[in-house]
Amino acid sequence: MGNKETISLWQLFILILIFEMGSATVVGIGGEAKQNVWIAISLAGLIGVGYIYLLHFMLGRKKGYNLFALIEFCLGKWLGGVISFLYIIYFIYISSRVLRDFGELIVSTIFIFTPIEIISITIILTIIYMLNSGIEVMARTSEIFFPYVFSFTFLVGIFILLSGEIQFENLRPFLDEGIKPIFQAIIPGLLTFPFGELIAFAVVLPLVTKYKKAKGFAAGSIILSTLVLVYSSVIQVLTLGHEMKERSNFPLLSAAREISLLDFIERVDIAVVFVVMFGIIVKIGVFFFGAIKGLEHISNREYRTYLIPVGSIICLSSIIITDNFAEHIEEGLQIVPYFVHLPFQFALPLMLLVIVLIRTRERSGGKRSDINWES
């Protein structure tokens, strides 16, 4: 199946950061917390750090095993094959939803008269091209674009502030309804999107050159991405207010359209679209990679064999997944978190963790069997 691919610790840091920013920076998250959304995101980010530690610990029990190899180790070939196939479907499904998010953003803001199918095909072909060269190419590309993505996100807030469009009273009152809305925003919303989606990195983590140090870099990336999401959400609330933020499909884009500085700096929403575009490419790319690596594991055929077939399925599914964007959003809020995300992001990984701890302890005669491996 070819030489083993590897990525550096810094590349892992960048991938997770851009993955977490992804579509979460531009779509409204944590709406239940209203003007206190920054508290909800901060707490959810701490849970995200714990989650990546859990994944790192679980994968560390068996050197070099990714999610699919670990599933087979825990559940056997046949039952493990069924669960692995379900994870493949899950990764493809989430890729399709993320692609639909971006397609709707583009056709409703920039290329209004362009069919969404053209946007979807273009993005998928770009991702196929990168993954055909390996996940490390996507990681290196992320390194190149990271400064621009990060800078544009930061500058949007600065320009809004200088434009005088910020109303600080929009952040008040503080916890006027108590902590209940905070936890309603976290569970299952913020818990599953974007932090629970880190389950896709259970396929990527074993490729890191120094696995023992990976959890620190991953945790640092999650903390930084949490700060970026807090920054983005606060900007949205300060500019639009929490009510208008919730009514807008793309609140950061709506906020960016308010920028008019010195009659010169305008149309900054184009920069927002660029940030989202690259975040979407990385996010779909990681889920896409997870799906084809799963197919590689259960079929013993090189993952590149599945690039075009799986890419075609993702592209087609993104178009037919729902009839319209309103239905897409409703499905994403009411159905996906409870019946799709929670089982694959938390229930199954926790079950695997218990089984792998029992099995590795049995094989080591009751001694500690955790593995601190550098590569």
Image (spheres, rainbow, N blue to C red):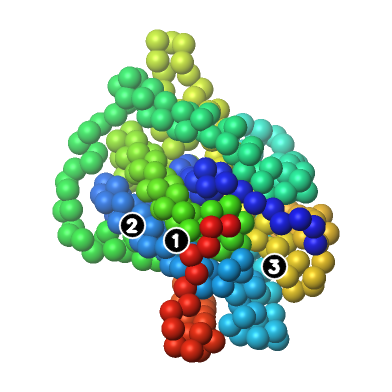
Q: Nearer the viewer, residue 26 or 301?
A: 301
Residue picked out by circle 2 = 46
3D distance between C-alphas at marks 3 and 1: 20 Å
Instruction: Tell me the amino acid under the disc marked 1.
Output: Ile
Residue occupying image coordinates x 59% and y 61%: 206
Would residue 8 be visible to someone looking at this image? yes
In primary-sequence order, the first of circles 2 and 1 is 2
Query: Few, some or many C-alpha atoms within 10 Å of disc 3 (few <14, some 14-19, many ≥20)?
Result: many
Q: In the image, 65: left or right of 367?
A: right
Instruction: Tell me the amino acid under the disc marked 2.
Output: Leu
Residue occupying image coordinates x 48% and y 19%: 266
Image position of 3 with respect to 256: above or below? below
Query: Few, some or many C-alpha atoms within 10 Å of disc 2 (few <14, some 14-19, many ≥20)?
Result: some
Callout 2: helix, strand or loop? Answer: helix
Image position of 9 with respect to 363: above or below? above
Which numbered tag is attached to residue 52? 1
Residue occupying image coordinates x 69% and y 67%: 294
Residue picked out by circle 3 = 294
Q: Which of labels 2 and 1 is toward the front?
A: 1
Callout 3: helix, strand or loop? Answer: helix
In primary-sequence order, the first of circles 2 and 3 is 2
Q: Quadrant of the N terminus?
A: bottom right
Q: Are marks 3 and 1 in contact (CB under 8 Å)?
A: no
Q: Nearer the viewer, residue 305 or 339?
A: 305
Quarter residue 145 falls in: top right
Q: Nearer the viewer, residue 275 or 206?
A: 206
Q: In the image, 235: left or right of 266?
A: left
Which numbered tag is attached to residue 13? none
3D distance between C-alphas at marks 2 and 3: 29 Å
Residue 320: where, in percent of width, then height? 70, 59
Instruction: Tell me the amino acid under the disc marked 3.
Output: Gly
Q: Are marks 2 and 1 in contact (CB under 8 Å)?
A: no
